[in-house]
Image (spheres, helix red, strand yellow):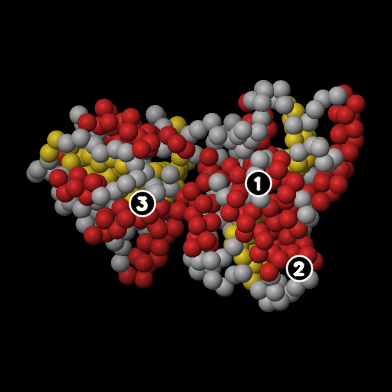
Amino acid sequence: MGMMSEAPSSERVQIGFFGIRNAGKSSVVNAVTGQNLSVISDTPGTTTDPVRKAMEISPIGPVVVIDTPGFDDEGELGTMRVAKTKETLRRVDVAVLVVDGTRGMRAKDRELLDIFEKLRIPYVVALNKADLMQRVQETKTEMTGAVSQSRELSAGAAEVLPQVGREAERRAVPHAEFAVSAKTGWHIRELKDLIGKLGKAKISSRGLLDGLIEPGDLFVLVIPQDASAPKGRLILPEQMMIHEILDHASMALCCQPPQLRQTLAFLAQSGKKIRMVITDSQAFSEVSKAVPEEIPLASFSILMARYKGVLEEAARGVKAVDMLQDGDKVLMSEGCTHHRQCQDIGTVKIPAWLRAYTKKNISIETSSGFGFPEDLSPYRMVIHCGGCMLNEKEVQSRMRQAKEQGVPFTNYGITIAYMNGILQRSAKAIGLSL
């Protein structure tokens, strides 16, 4: 984990570059980033796996750039590479479709546009190799929704093939299309400007406590430091929470669960009103007994679900816990990979609490990192981590995938609160009506 001042990958604008082999995709990536991020070659299929790089790009800011293999790759390995490209699409905030301008749009390019549309990914069609084009035509960039303000920027600079312009008319998500040349640098600056405007929605002031905090508020953060806590640092949700409280000119008082009653007694004597107690989910049961009913109580995990836009669906999905039967499979999914301790929350603690709560012999399977099963039908429900290491698109994509397959989806903190009978209390604390 980096320093608090560094933007974690999950909070950066994720920019994915897509296209068929030999469209010059990696050359465009290198031109946009100003770095030799990807290997370039005249041989089709040089990029064999998604290449990810966290960096700063002016005028966008903190980003993760992802260069993907050719979407028309063939053979057994090629099929696997295309599958990885499709998986990458679940976490992309802005997509750049690089098309060989000398050849025009191909069937696989249109297939990618259809996926962008389905997943509601804002995109730019970059007609590369403009220096080699025989026929180009002045036109204005078609923009909608969140990026309508970029019309003036693009109208005078956009030179596109007529068929690409016609293709764009059928599309509803925010998009733009114009010619570029990675070789000469022509329109690369305009391409970066458009990517920045399309990704602007990602860079916002919304936070974990959005609508729940005012200057001068006091928050008590309960942060266990047991065997499963990382040594010498706070986990990302705790870092984000402290940062946000400080940014709002408010106060954060941190303690461990055994010191909570003493902390609350001290604050009661001082007469300072507590805006909210926020706890690590693992300590929910102990903390809820110590916090008086009149003090709002929530968890980092529940607030993270709210921040990622999956709270309401997760609050509905948790009720599937009551339907679990002997032999049912539950998928415990984590967005990060880490060394698992003997009392790991996902593989040890929650499974034990689930079996104690349901009194059923439940089978537990796990996934971690970017790995998430395509077929969720074997599972009775999915219990996901807070998703702090995944961006909003990825978490929402996993939730939609489960919903489309009829598999209830919830998260760690909501499950723990539900099994302890305090989900209603926590929902009320953050303004959610269940």
Element type where label 1 sits in the image? loop
* Residue behind mark 1: 433
Q: Percent x, y for residue 396?
A: 51, 52
Image-based side of 270 in relation to 183, left or right: right
Q: Earlier in the sequence, mark 3 or mark 1?
A: 3
Dot 1 alpha-carbon crowd within 10 angstroms: few under 14, some 14 to 19, many 20 or more: few
Q: Which mark is residue 116?
A: 3
Q: Amino acid at mark 2?
A: Thr
Report the front residue among 159 and 359. Answer: 359
| Disc number lying in front (1 or 2) | 1
Q: Amino acid at mark 1?
A: Ser
| Disc number lying in front (3 or 2) | 2
The reply to whether residue 333 is visible in this rendering is no
Q: Amino acid at mark 3?
A: Phe
Q: Which mark is residue 369?
A: none
Q: Earlier in the sequence, mark 1 or mark 2?
A: 2
Instruction: Report which quarter residue 59 is drawn in.
Output: top left
Query: How far separated are the C-alphas under marks 1 and 2?
Result: 25 Å
The reply to whether residue 289 is visible in this rendering is yes
Residue at 37% x, 58% y is 48
Query: How far separated are the C-alphas under marks 3 and 2?
Result: 41 Å
Residue at 59% x, 70% y is 379
* Residue behind mark 2: 358
Query: How far separated are the C-alphas under marks 3 and 1?
Result: 33 Å
